[in-house]
Image (tube, rainbow, N blue to C red):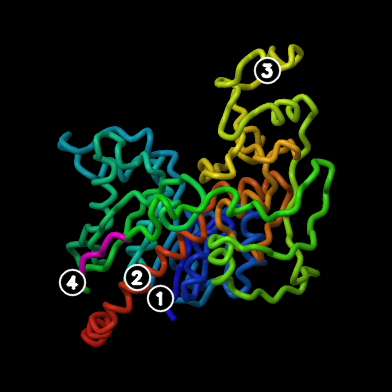
Amino acid sequence: MYKVLDLFSGCGGLGEGFLQAGFDVAASVEIDEKACTTQRQNHPDTQVLQADLTQLSPEELTKVTGIKQFDVIIGGPPCQGFSLIGTRLGTGKGFGEFGEDPRNKLYKEFVKYVRYFQPKMFLMENVPGLFSMHKGAVKINIEQDFSYDDPDGHFIGYHVVSDVVKAVEFGVPQNRERVIFLGIRKDFNAIPEHPSAVYTENEFANVKDAIGDLPPLDIRDGNFSVKHTLKNKSTFLNNLNKNAKDIKRDNGYQKGLLYNHTTRFQNERDREIFRILEPFQNLKTLDPELIPIRLRNGFDDFYRKLDFNKPSPTIIAHLHKDGLAFIHPDGNQARSISVREAARLQSFPDNFVFSGPQTAMYKQIGNAVPPMLAYHLASHVKQTLDVLKDSYEQVAVSS
């Protein structure tokens, strides 16, 4: 079983996909305490380290975990610095100045771990806008950083390909795009292949496929768990849970119960707007005459109701602040989506239980890589490693 290190792991969405694909996610590092708690209870066999990667060296990680080698390193470093990077190519200053920008330090930590452990492959994901930043200079700089060979022989570079992947093409009921960088260590003499889409447009999963079976919910309902039996399963729901690992829990969780199907409180003013809106309509497109007079002044125009028959818009971390852009399609319920519904739209299996305050749960879900997308990417990585097996066994013998 291939051993994986998951950096900037969040609540474990990317790691969940790799676990489902048959990898051993042996260790992960995440700075957020609540996300670590969620990951520990869902990935009990993973050593989850709550740590700041700028303060945790690879040597210290090895000392704490006892693990000296990983086959694959995965992760999604935060991208705050990328949007502020000045174009470096063509200035004569080269790649070094980009790497020295302190705003990119988190990204550089990922590179540092790859160079130290020298995994056979790595997979890094990030925001789609990265490709167009500064006319492609940022993307090229990142690829150069991974492909760079140390002239003193301290580390080997990687053959790297990068791509924009659409989650909906990999079974996720959501219009979400991510950039991935996929690398194979150069001494294997192989170029990574781009992962291929799994589904075409007429096969895309939609909101109804994901949440249409869930019991109606009132904003006053506060039950952390509900009895729920899946009926009339959609293809999406079959795929959602078929690869999920059985988790042995010792903290009172019971099989057969659905957890986290709770929603935030909404005032009656908002709920009236929720009832008026049509699917995928927002207040900018709504006839003002349809809005009650008392609601016409001072309302936020960011209200948006989901459409049962379409994929969801991108689930984002802002969801933890309010749910106004993710209103449930059923006007009778007049509410924003629940934690479990957000998790379904992000393709977390039903046995994945979130920890912390409700706002923290929404934030964890919005920040995560959809596990179903991660599963297909992991399967692609596994297939590549299997093909390379003879090659890296020869490399191991020669080294």
- Counting every numbered tag in the picture gives 4
Dot 2 crowding, Cα within 10 Å, few <14, some 14–19, many 20+: many
Residue underneath mark 4: 189
Q: Are marks 2 and 1 in contact (CB under 8 Å)?
A: yes
Dot 3 crowding, Cα within 10 Å, few <14, some 14–19, many 20+: few
Task: Say which of marks 2 and 3 sits in front.
Answer: 3
- Mark 4 and mark 2: Cα distance apart in space: 14 Å
- Mark 3 and mark 4: Cα distance apart in space: 64 Å
Residue underneath mark 2: 119
- Mark 2 and mark 3: Cα distance apart in space: 59 Å
N-term-proximal mark, 1 vs 3: 1
Report the magenta residues as a range.
190-195
| Main secondary structure type of the part rendered in magenta | loop
Residue at x-position 45% and y-position 71% = 4
Residue underneath mark 1: 69
Q: Which mark is residue 290?
A: 3
N-term-proximal mark, 4 vs 2: 2
Residue at x-position 58% and y-position 59% = 348
Q: Amino acid at mark 2?
A: Pro
SS at circle 4:
loop
